[in-house]
Amino acid sequence: SVAASADPATDSTAPASDGDGGSDSPFRIVAVTSCPTGIAHTYMAAESLENAGREAGVDLVVETQGSAGFTRLDPAVIAAADAVIFAHDVPVRDKDRFAGKPTVDVGVKAGINRPAELISEVRGKAERGEVTGGAAPTPVERGGEEGEGYGSMLRKWLMSGVSYMVPFVAAGGLLIALGFAIGGYEIKSAPSVMQHFVWTQTDSWAALMFQIGGVAFGFLVPVLAGYIAYGMADRPGLVPGFVGGMIASTINAGFLGGLAAGLIAGGVVLAIQKVKIPKAVRGIMPVVVIPLISTAIVGFLMFVVIGKPIASAQKGMTDWLNGLSGSNAILLGALLGLMMCFDLGGPVNKVAYTFATAGIAVSNPSDSAMKIMAAVMAAGMVPPLAMALATTVRGRLFTETERENGKAAWVLGASFISEGAIPFAAADPLRVIPSSMVGGAITGALSMSFGATLRAPHGGIFVVPLIGNPFLYLIAIAVGMCVTAALVVVLKGMRKPVAGGTAPGAPEDIAAPAADTKQPVAA
């Protein structure tokens, strides 16, 4: 976990606490942050909340539920807290620990963009004595605000599945790509390493990596379906979800089948849980009755009712992608580039990324699928690299903190972490986001027109040796980066001077107490 406390020097002047700590104690807040991939947004929200907590004179401790797992907050710290902030896009794990306290529950981007407002809101709830009740039946129902619509809940269910699937995508895809890089594309026809493995032959090592990656890829659809069902119905949804996902893989229904299987499994379990059961039978419901009935229903629906139509739809989409050429391919590249840069790691970005990885998540992906993956990664690298370039060539247009963020953005962009541009987008969305979308669309279109291909689902600049037409691919990224940086510099330079102050971008403006000076450095 990541923890931050108010500076002792400020505690004596901090507002009086409404909690149990006494009038001389600072107001205590515990927070949890999490995002679908558990990489950038999770830690940026934590840092943003910590900074705002120090400024507000409150004692704020954050539990980051990232991709590397999480360390639970000390129960004593939770018990002593006066309020709770949840900033998350996937279900908060073990949320019952925080029940009975004033709570603000928002998306992870709110934790990045308006932390001071969240702290003020939760203090207001504490003053009014508003507390949360006991746990609701499912993680997502516990994770949403009261009155949350089904659209928001559906997004969280899907993001729950994607968040658990992404590590399998990265591990499997990179291993397969390395196998191809070492042994060539004929390595896919190599015999099993169980029967033939020579320690001194590079082809054997290439075959080993390819076959391990293939096994990892085999889990993608079951994991996606299983954790969508988990997001809906907690642990009882895992068995029917995984089984439905495996059936989707077996009948070649692909990712569309996995999405359907996960949603059906979660819905079936929720329906079973609403049935009134005699007390004598309740003990065996979670381990026998619910898994048995839900798995049978999901299996029947996937095999007999909806599996074949979904498999046909999946095949139709694959054939359409394989047939893309010329202007159609370029337009698709531009569209995917726009999506990758629209919300910088958010749901729209994840839709484009998942669409691309679905195409290469097979042992023998088509050329079109690898072109789509290349366009998506190239466009996703543009925003942070462009912000890094803009802060380098026109640093006076940016605050000191933004210039520091720009240094980190070089590495984040080169690593294909689009979230590196979030501090800039949060501070100036009307200039940064449209500029990023223009550059991303150009990069995606150029990548497709150059015929660049990519077998790895991640890695950024570090997997360039695995890219087809790497020189032209780098040119596509450079063009998009320069276009975005130029647009940002021009748009920021057109800002009118603040009344009674200096023009934004003048050196004096850097020290002005503006909101954009408080953006966190990307983790």
Image (cartoon, rainbow, N blue to C red):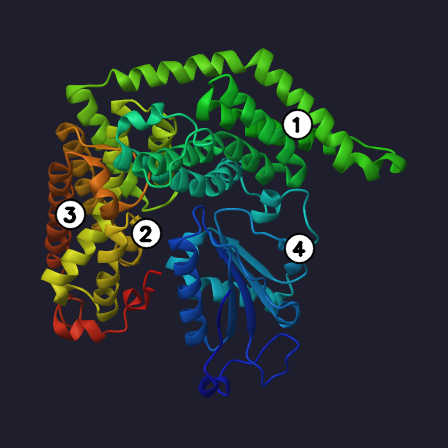
Q: Are marks 2 and 1 in contact (CB under 8 Å)?
A: no
Residue tagged 3: 481
* Mark 4 neighbour class, 10 Å CA radius: few under 14, some 14 to 19, many 20 or more: some
* Mark 2 neighbour class, 10 Å CA radius: few under 14, some 14 to 19, many 20 or more: many
Quadrant of residue 444 within the rendered picture: top left
Mark 2 belongs to which amino acid? Glu
> In the drawing, what numbered circle is on residue 96?
4
Indicate the position of residue 144 as horizontal and vertical percent values. Answer: 56, 47
Mark 1: secondary structure: helix
Mark 1 belongs to which amino acid? Val
In the drawing, does residue 134 fall left or right of residue 168?
right
Residue tagged 1: 268
Q: Earlier in the sequence, mark 1 or mark 3?
A: 1
Q: Earlier in the sequence, mark 1 or mark 4?
A: 4
Residue tagged 2: 419
Q: CA distance from mark 2 to mark 1?
A: 36 Å
Indicate the position of residue 158 as horizontal and vertical percent values. Answer: 49, 36
